[in-house]
Image (cartoon, grey):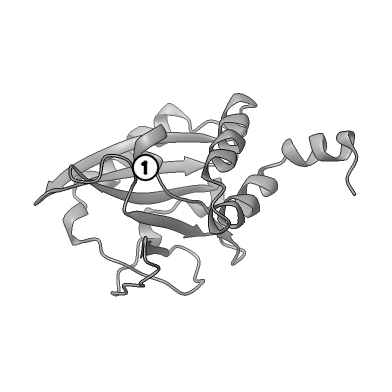
Amino acid sequence: MLDKQALQQQLATPEFYKKVFPGMLRKGKRKDAQETWDNAVHKGIADAVLLTEAVNGSFLYKVYAFSVNGSIQEDVIEELKEQVNDFDVNQIRYEAVGVPGYFAVYDRDGKFFQEDYEIMALCRQTEGIYIVIVSETEADELDCPYIVYTFNPDGSLWFWTMARKYL
């Protein structure tokens, strides 16, 4: 059993936030996951920046940069925005398997969609910044229909869903 001090030390490390989100969401603890993320942002551990968005049919795709290594610097944000500027958001589909630089998307029924698309070129892995694409539709105002995960260079799974709702 962790004591309060040990837990506080864990809460002050990026590794905690990389590992805890997927487990929370699988167990339906989205509110807890959001509070955990807010805590990371408040402590200056995490950051999220909207880089661009695009419409395809009734869906709005938003491209975020996420970091659990502190705030993303302005010059890095500008560089990432330039990188995704020519990136066709509407071509993004669904990729899987725990390969660094890939993302996976599941719908709410747990059905898994897969199509080859590598976003490794957009991931600044050495700086701990990852590009995540989130989609939403007007017909689904209460919940995001997709859960988005990124994979870290060490092979661990990180991140969650509903970015468009909270960030």
Residue drawn at the location 53% of the way across and 30% of the way down: 71
Q: Around disc 1, counting alpha carbons within 10 Å, would you say few (fewer than 14), some (14 to 19), or many (20 or more)?
A: many
Front-lying residue, 57 or 32: 32
* Quadrant of the snapshot with the C terminus: top left
Looking at the rendered structure, the number of numbered marks drawn on it comes to 1
Residue drawn at the location 33% of the way across and 48% of the way down: 144
Instruction: Answer yes or no: is residue 88 visible.
Output: no
Q: Is residue 112 left or right of residue 17?
A: left
Residue 109 occupies which quadrant of the picture? bottom left
Q: Is residue 88 left or right of residue 24?
A: left
Q: Is residue 112 left or right of residue 58?
A: right
Q: Is residue 166 above or below residue 89?
A: above
Q: Is residue 3 above or below residue 111?
A: above
Please name the residue that numbered disc 1 is placed on: 64
Residue drawn at the location 61% of the way across and 57% of the way down: 23
Q: Is residue 47 above or below residue 162?
A: above
